[in-house]
Structure formats: structure tokens, C-alpha cells
Amino acid sequence: MSKVIAITGAARGIGFATARALKAKGATVVIGDIDEEAAKEAGDRLGVQAFTVDVTSRESFEAFLGKAETGGLDVLVNNAGIMPIGPVTAESDADARRCMDINVHGVMLGTKLALDRMLPRGHGHVINIASIAGVLPTPGLALYNASKAAVIAFTEATRLEVQERGVHVSAVLPTFTNTDLIAGTRSPKGQKNAEPEDIAAAVVALVGRPRAQVTVPAKLAAQIRLGGLFPDR
Ligand code: NAD
């Protein structure tokens, strides 16, 4: 795979596993994270270029993509995200804004900046890491649910807008995955959590064969299909 791929929020978790899997396939991977030290450490471990980036800042994101795209950016994985947990009445205005700023505005900004580069070339792929939480509202996760529902809708609308112009836009909907993000939460009864490598494998497959949306793991996706929610396309 001779692609240049930038991944945000890749100092750990799903982004890190995705970077490792894509590098193993031969891609030139560049990672970014707001956590400077962790990004550097992850870059050293993976043997890839690593930069500090705050996806909520146009200046910072623009600079990150500028460094990543020497040779042309083929794929951007908008992976950075946070998950506030707790009753909606307990969320401060600042917490709510922060969640929307990172999870929604960060994805919108990254998509837009990537499209600015990809559309003139008629080539490229933006992969937005959404969540099953975007289609399965859950008490205690209202903000997160809302942010991921927004990512799914934004991704689909953008996909339809640019699909005739050679650029793909896809959403990945992971289920509960064992990372720092969900430390301290309990997964739904009877459901085995996914591993970051499961989501990474889905992203690798998506890079090879673009689709509008994929829910991971597929077994749960099948249950969701039976329930009549968002089928995979
Ligand atoms: P994680 O907490 O392990 O990693 C997220 C990374 O994003 C961290 O390294 C963090 O420093 C970085 N980050 C946070 N804010 C940032 C910002 N403003 N700019 C740049 N980087 C920033 O989480 P994860 O589980 O690997 O999650 C990755 C993505 O997958 C998120 O979008 C998350 O919502 C989504 N997701 C996770 C799960 C799950 O169960 N873990 C399920 C569905 C979707």
C-alpha cells in the first residue's frame, strides 16, 4: 500500500493500533495527538513521524496536515475524540462545548482541510471514526451520543456531496473497545468488548475498499441490522 495516511489522536488506543496496522501494510503513516509526550513516544514505538496537533484549532490542524502531506495526502483518519460520562444535568457548559469542539468540530475541520487538498486532485479518502453510540442513545452518554450522531450525519452528507469527484468519505462505527477512553465504564451485558486491533483492521479494509459506513465488529453490526438500525453500506 503506497499511500500517505495521517491519523489524529493516535498516541494511544484505536488511533495507535490503526497506525501500526496501516504501517504494516506499507503505508507512510503520520500521527498527531494533543498529548505531545505520548505522541512522541508513540511515534518512536511505531517508527513513524509524530506531531502535536489540536484538532479544535484550524492553525494547528493545518500545520499538521502541511507536515503530513509531503508527497500528497491520500487518507486522513479523523480519530481524535473524548467521551464525557455522566447525567446531562451534571455537565458544565464548558464540558459540553469541549465535547462538541473535539468530536464534531474537529472532524468537520479535518474533513474540510483534507477536502481542500483532495478535491483539486480528484483523489483521496477521509475516514471519520464515529461510534455505535451515534445510533444507540444511552443514559449517561447524551453528549457523546449527540456528538457521534452528528459525525455520522456530517460524514454521510459530505460523502454524497463529493462522491462524484473522486474523493471518498466514510464513517467507522466501533462498538465498545478496550482503550483508555472507556476505562471505568462497564460494557453492555453479555457483550465482549472489541480490541483496538479489530477497529484498525476495519480501517485497513476500508482504505483498500472504500464504503460509506462500517460498524465493527461485524457480529454486532448484524444484530443492529436485525434491529433495523443503520445497515452497513
Ligand atoms: P483514547 O482516549 O485511547 O485515544 C484518544 C486520543 O485522542 C488520545 O490520545 C487523546 O490525547 C487524543 N485527543 C483528545 N483530544 C484531542 C485533540 N483536541 N486533538 C488531538 N488529539 C486529541 O480513545 P480511543 O478509544 O482510542 O478513541 C478513538 C476514537 O474512537 C474516538 O473518536 C472515540 O470516540 C472512538 N470510539 C471509541 C470507542 C471505545 O469504546 N473505545 C467506541 C467507539 C468509538
Image (tube, rainbow, N blue to C red):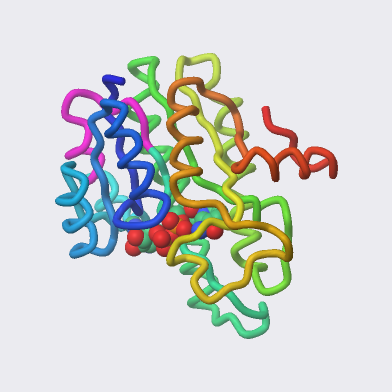
Name the residue: 49% across, 60% down: 178
Residue 230, magenta (yes or no): no
Q: Is residue 123 left or right of residue 174?
A: left
Find residue 114 and report its image quarter: top left
- As displayed, is residue 23 above or below residue 42? above
Residue 175, position as x, y percentages in the image: 61, 52
Residue 95, position as x, y percentages in the image: 50, 75
- As displayed, is residue 43 above or below residue 179? above
Find residue 57 and report its image quarter: bottom left
- The part of the chain drawn in magenta is 64-76
Front residue of this view, candidates 94 and 206: 206
Name the residue: 57% across, 48% down: 174
Residue 16, position as x, y percentages in the image: 33, 50
* Residue 118 in view here: yes
Name the residue: 73% across, 61% down: 190
Q: Is residue 188 left or right of residue 51?
A: right
Front residue of this view, candidates 229 and 195: 195
